Image: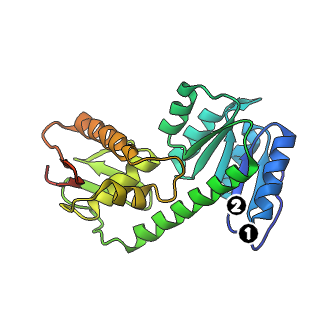
Amino acid sequence: MTKPAAASALATVLIVEDEPAIAEALAVALYREGYRCLRAGLGREARVLFRDDQPDLVLLDVGLPDGSGFDLCREWLAAAKVPTVFLTARGEEFDRVLGLELGADDYIVKPFSLREVVARVRAILRRASRARERASSDEQTPEGPALFRIDETRVRIEYCGARLELTRYEFGLLRALLAHPQRVFSRAELMDRVWADALDTGERTVDAHVKMLRAKLRAITLEHEPIVTHRGLGYSIDPCG
């Protein structure tokens, strides 16, 4: 477990990888770009670094000697919405889908290009920074509109008094809609607000996440249908259903 310092770093990246050569190559590539890097080869080491150093992004191997990267991802995304990218030799579709459904931001299969990893890290951190800026500038009452309550500090949204279990992107999408009730957002606008600078992501991603959001809202109550589809235009939200 290593903790190199870099006072002028752009951000701190936690690399959880049990293969020393891969971890070293990633650390060197990221350090050259100005990032501060922490390294852990075991899940228990990663937990300590995550708790003590609060990284800005995590590069996480799925297969660790003392556990699953999926389990680690569940743990820290439940505590804090930290951008997470899976690095793994497992490229099956099931694993990719599971990782993304857990709330991870990306999934890169080994062998990979170091330049590609650095580019994806940069894009994800830029997107996270823009999301924070929008969150601080959007006008929003403490209670949130109507049936919804937004807790910015805990990154949570309640609907009809029940907490919604949301992934990072579901939270961002719902929050963007709630910030401007009744306004129709095109898919491109929502992509820019929630998935800005995402690589290999198309506008149909918005449709998929709207579908998942609707399912979670309906699981709480069928009395309201707050998300409205405007054919050929995009989506809006009616907080009163």
* Residue under label 2: 12
Does 188 appear above or below 75?
below
Three-letter residue code for mark 1: Ala
Residue at 14% of width from left, 53% of height from top?
Answer: 240
Viewer-side residue, 156 vs 209? 209
Counting from the top left corner in percent of width and height, residue 192 is at 41, 60
Q: Give left or right: position of 215 versus 202.
A: left
Q: Give left or right: position of 147 versus 30.
A: left
Question: Do callouts 1 and 2 mark residues in contact (Cβ within 8 Å)?
Answer: yes
Counting from the top left corner in percent of width and height, residue 232 is at 22, 50
Q: Give left or right: position of 49 versus 72.
A: right
Cα gap from disc 1 to disc 2, whole angstroms: 7 Å
Q: Give left or right: position of 49 versus 138.
A: right
Q: Quarter-wise, where is residue 63 in the image?
A: top right
* Residue under label 1: 9
Residue at 52% of width from left, 61% of height from top?
Answer: 127
Kind of element beneath mark 1: loop
**Extreme front residue here?**
232
Residue at 30% of width from left, 66% of height from top?
Answer: 142
Does 204 appear above or below 5?
above
Does 109 appear above or below 168?
above
Counting from the top left corner in percent of width and height, residue 1 is at 83, 47
Residue at 25% of width from left, 47% of height from top?
Answer: 161
Does 94 appear above or below 85?
above
Q: Quarter-wise, where is residue 213 in the image?
A: top left
| Residue 164 in view, yes or no | no
Three-letter residue code for mark 2: Thr
| Residue 63 in view, yes or no | yes
Mark 2 Cα-neighbour bin, 10 Å: few <14, some 14–19, many ≥20: many
Tally the numbered discs: 2
Mark 1 Cα-neighbour bin, 10 Å: few <14, some 14–19, many ≥20: some
